[in-house]
Amino acid sequence: MPRRPRVEYAGFHHIINRGVARGKIFLKEDDYEVFLEILEHTKKIYNFHVHSLCLMDNHYHLLIETKYENLSMLARQLNSKYAQYFNREYKRVGPLWQGRFKNWYVHSEKYLNALVRYVEQNPIKAGITQKIGEYRWSASTLLLEQKYSDLFEGSLLLEKEMFSLLDVALSKNDKEILEKLNQTIYKRVEDTIVQQKQISLDEYFSKIENLKMRNEKIILALNDGYKQSEIASYLNVTSSLVSYVAKHKKNRGQVTNVKF
């Protein structure tokens, strides 16, 4: 499956990483504290802002703002150092993380405002707490308790206006904004980061006349950044079919009538 291009541009990034097989990455309170200490140390090395975070038992969310194109380096530092601690602490071997971390570049102010609420409301969505400030391992609670002040220096949540919005539930429109912008691809034009046009799957497949045309559209959609699983789900076909079309195109340089 082709990977979505990693966006390293300086600016706001939403980062998610999960435990392997969705296993827990935090087993006791000390684990959360060690993770935050490693994050704080990583911040000092790579010079970025932590605006929001939420540490759940089997995954974490970070909303950071980088000043340089060093996202992969700082994420590798954070994830590897914590994995080393976790494996040593619990006498385990093997990978801790499900795979490479996921990140989304935040180019829109609407996206940013919705995203801050999304991250901080994770424990509420999961039914762990009922309101902002109750879940111990979220930025909002740590700020209210005046903990890790160096870590959150420069955070958007230090602004009263932004903090006051955290309790506002995400509307249907907010969720649509998040979904749409999570799929957006960006590119650099000279010194400016611009949104790369992405055609919806409806536009790709609404006027398919035969299998050859369908397969050609599959290739175009893959090149536009869609995942094989997204295309398979939309077309109600197997992921293996989409994978076969992609491999056939790569090997033969053309798309033929794949019938299954």
Image (cartoon, rainbow, N blue to C red):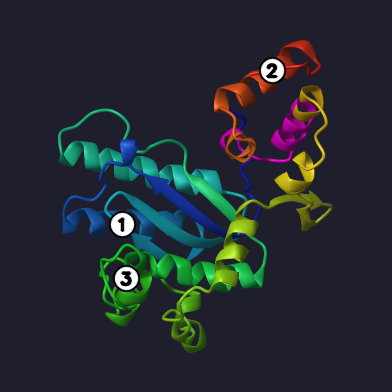
Name the secondary structure under disc 3.
loop
173 in relation to 164, above or below? above
The span shown in magenta is 215-229
**Which one is nearer the viewer's eye here, 176 or 12?**
176
> Which quadrant, please, contains the C terminus?
top right
- Marks 1 and 3: which is nearer the front? 1
Left or right of residue 110, residue 128 in this image:
left
Separation of marks 1 and 2 at Cα, in angstroms: 44 Å
Residue at image mark 1: 56
User: Pointer 3: what residue?
Assistant: 148
Amino acid residing under circle 3? Tyr
- Residue drawn at x 46%, y 67% as measured from the top left: 118
Tell me the number on the disc at residue 259. Answer: 2
Please tell me whether mark 2 or mark 3 is closer to you in this view. 2
Q: Are marks 1 and 3 in contact (CB under 8 Å)?
A: no
Q: Residues within 10 Å of mark 1 (few under 14, many from 20)?
A: some
Instruction: Give how far apart the Cα atoms at labels 1 and 3 are.
Output: 18 Å
Name which residue type carries label 1. Met
| Residue at x 26% of width, y 76% of height | 134
Q: Earlier in the sequence, mark 2 or mark 3?
A: 3
Q: SS of the residue at dot 2?
A: loop
